Every structure is written in structure tokens, then in C-alpha cells.
Amino acid sequence: MKAKFLIPLLLFVVLVIFLAVGLNRDPHEVPSPLINKPAPAFDIPQLAQANKTFSPESMKGQVWILNVWASWCVACREEHPVLVELAHSQQAPVIGLDYKDKREDALAMLAKQGNPYVLSAFDANGRVGIDYGVYGVPETYVIDRAGIIRFKHIGPITPAVLNEKIYPLLSELKKS
């Protein structure tokens, strides 16, 4: 008779533990299966120069940052001044991936707010974003000299994230 009540109680306790662990996690630190794996390859048109393409292969040998953004994304606009600061620091080249956007809207946003990107690739249909496991924009990846993804941040980069996570990681990756 006691076993009849003990099993549901144990299941409830296990469920509460899983819920407590899940609620204490930072939603910006969703584990990515791509961490410590090669960045997915692609070759797509650039945003500003549609007749030219960009491929991560061209960045081999450099530590660089891939920032997935869109002009329609409110959080991307919030993050934009931090990206401008990052670009001015010259810690690493910042490449944009304009995700599911209209070319003219994206170019207008960059013209108005400043362009922190060395260049932006134009992912009109979102295929590259899917390959990178993009949950939603903005998302930012730090990629090492060998083309391996070393860090992923979901959501807007804040000054705290920049100073506490990205800058130290860039310094470490540049040493190796």
C-alpha cells in the first residue's frame, strides 16, 4: 500500500528538481551542440555588395565574431551600440549575418545607426541561420583561428557580457 503512494511522490520530487534546475539557468546560455565544433560552411552574397560573397573559410587564421542580426529585430537595435564599441576596440573582426531581412531595410538601419561590421552576409531565406542553430536574433558566435566555434551568446550583447566573457575569450584565443 505504501509503495502505491511512494512512486508518485518520488516522481513529483524528481519533477520539482528538474524544474528548479531549469529555472535557475540563464536563458542566454542555451547549450549549443556547435561549441568546440567547426563553424558551418556557407558561401552567400554580401549585404552591401550583392555581387560579392562571403564564406567563413575566408576568415581562417583569424579569431573573429559572427553576429546574427536583422533590421526588424528590436533587441538587435538595443545591442547595436555595444557592437559599435566592440568594432572600435579592434579586438576581432565583427562579421554580420543579416537574417531573414530585406536588403534595403538592413542597409538603411546600418546607414542610420552606424555599421560595426567589417561586412555583413545576406541570409535572406534563413538557411545559414538554421545551420548555426539560431533560436532567434540576435545571436553572437566567437570563432577561433581554426574555424571552431568557441562561444555562443543568445540575445543582445550587453557591456557586461562584452567585458566579462567576450573580451577575455578573445584575448585567450589570440594567444594560442
Image (cartoon, grey):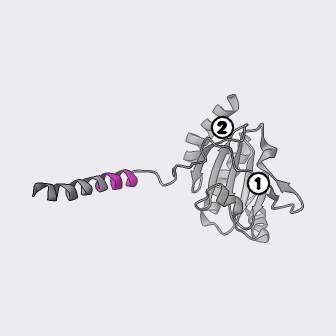
Crowd class of label 1 (few under 14; some 14 to 19; many from 20; radius 10 Å): some
- At numbered mark 2, what does the secondary structure look like: helix, strand or loop? helix
- Left or right: 165, with 20 as reference point: right
Look at the image and tell me in which quarter the N terminus lies: bottom left
Q: Earlier in the sequence, mark 2 or mark 1?
A: 1
- Left or right: 136, with 22 as reference point: right
Residue 137 % position (x, y): 62, 61
Q: Residue at x 52, y 53 (%)?
A: 28
Of residues 82 and 120, which is closer to you in this image? Answer: 120
Q: Residue at x 39, y 53 (%)?
A: 22
Q: Is residue 15 magenta?
A: no
Dividing the picture into quarters, in which one does residue 78 lie? bottom right
Which range of residues does the magenta coloring cover?
16-23
Q: Is residue 21 magenta?
A: yes
Amino acid carrying label 1: it is: Phe
Q: Residue at x 30, y 56 (%)?
A: 15
Residue at the right extreme? Answer: 51
Residue 94 drawn above or below residue 110: above
Amino acid carrying label 2: it is: Leu
Residue 167 % position (x, y): 63, 39
Residue 14 drawn above or below residue 167: below
Look at the image and tell me in which quarter the C terminus lies: top right
Instruction: Name the residue that disc number 1 marks.
Output: 42
Residue 46 drawn above or below residue 36: below
Of residues 109 and 123, which is closer to you in this image? Answer: 123
Instruction: Name the residue that disc number 2 marks.
Output: 170
Crowd class of label 2 (few under 14; some 14 to 19; many from 20; radius 10 Å): some
In terms of secondary structure, what is the magenta stretch mainly? helix
